[in-house]
Amino acid sequence: MQLISDFFTFFNDQFLKMKWLDQSVRWFFGDVLNIDRNSMLFESLSFFVYDVIKIFILLSILIFIASYIQSFFSPERTRKILSNHHGIGANLFGALLGTVTPFCSCSSIPIFIGFTKAGLPLGVTFSFLISSPLVDLASVILLASIFNWKIAIAYVVVGLVIAVIGGSLISFLKMEKYVESFVMENRQIINENDEEIDPSVMTKKERITYSFEQVKEIIHRVWIYILIGVGIGAIIHGFIPQSWIESVLGDKNPFSVILATLMGIPMYADIFGTLPIAEALVFKGVNIGTVLAFMMAVTALSLPSLIMLKKVVKTKLLLTFLGIVTIGIIIMGYLFNGFSYLFI
């Protein structure tokens, strides 16, 4: 048992947290470039270079693995699978589907439109829309690499709960009439006898090629947000006083979770760009629940995605979606803060 524990610790430290990389970066700036190790510049530069390299390495590997798995499921098969589930089970399946799609909130909206046009229940498509930018395989591994496995797994569970409850409430409220007519017109009826493209016809070489293409496409789409996020995190890490951050987002401010959620909404980034900011905030003493609330707000409720969503749903449905997810994130944040001793 101890051997397994030691192996897991070694794997976690060297392959996920990449402590060897952190040590190498600090050696380079401290011993090669002779930057004072106690200076703010040293801390910021080390943080920036280490996080950029680590995130891009892990992200590339994880996107490749997830894309290879995805190559076995065509959109037609996915829609048919979803159509065979009903009630809470359908919302859970829609939320779980979102976890294997590495999309930002804006990229998820065209998929949401396609699912709605295909005849899937509105609540199921909203469960997908909520979970897709919040939770995926890469975010779980990156969260574990920055924090720990307890926080990563708890984040996934909470994200799925918010997605399932959000979609279920929208189903219960029967809000189909608040979807724009061009989306609801000519909705398809999914027939179990419809033909679909069999994903098994792809060869192993084609799956590998597809996975590499997905890596290039997604990295091309998110690299700027990763650099911006790591840059902001580096500034927070090295230059912004801990006392100032604690006064605004620390546990002494009872509204810190609400403030962090509202701060996240106007921003636009995916989870990979927000993780370095979250890492820096935790280092500066901000509670984990407050940090996770900020992350969720940025990824699920960014202003650009809300503007895009407004083009396909009417105001009442948009406000309902915004209210449900915002309240869910705030409750999650306070719960994480209240039980933070279980995760750290």
Image (spheres, rainbow, N blue to C red):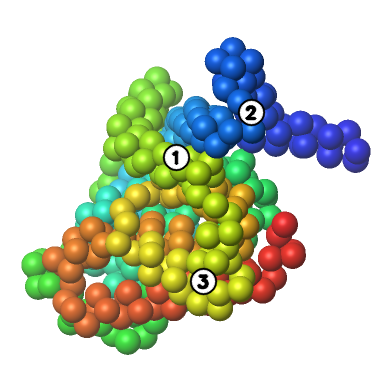
Q: Residue at x 39, y 78 (%)?
A: 324
Identify the amino acid type marked 2: Arg
Callout 2 secondary element: loop
Up-down relation of residue 245 to residue 276 (above or below):
below
161, 54: nearer the viewer: 54
Front one among 127 and 84: 127
Of the numbered discs in the image, which one, if any, rests on residue 230? 1
Q: Position of residue 304 (x, y in %)?
A: 23, 58
Left or right of 297 in this view: 119: left
Distance between mark 1 and mark 3 Cα atoms: 22 Å
In this rendering, is residue 176 above or below 271? below
Q: Which residue is mark 3?
A: 256
Crowding at mark 1 (Cα within 10 Å: few <14, some 14-19, many 20+): many
The answer for how far apart the CA atoms under marks 3 and 2 are is: 32 Å
Picture mark count: 3
**Which one is earlier in the sequence, the residue at label 1 or at label 3?**
1
> Which picture quadrant has residue 178?
bottom left
| First of labels 3, 2 by sequence position | 2
Q: Identify the residue at image location x=32%, y=37%.
A: 224
Q: Which kind of residue does numbered mark 1 sit on?
A: Val
From this view, report whether residue 104 is shown above or below residue 312.
above
Q: Which residue is mark 2?
A: 37
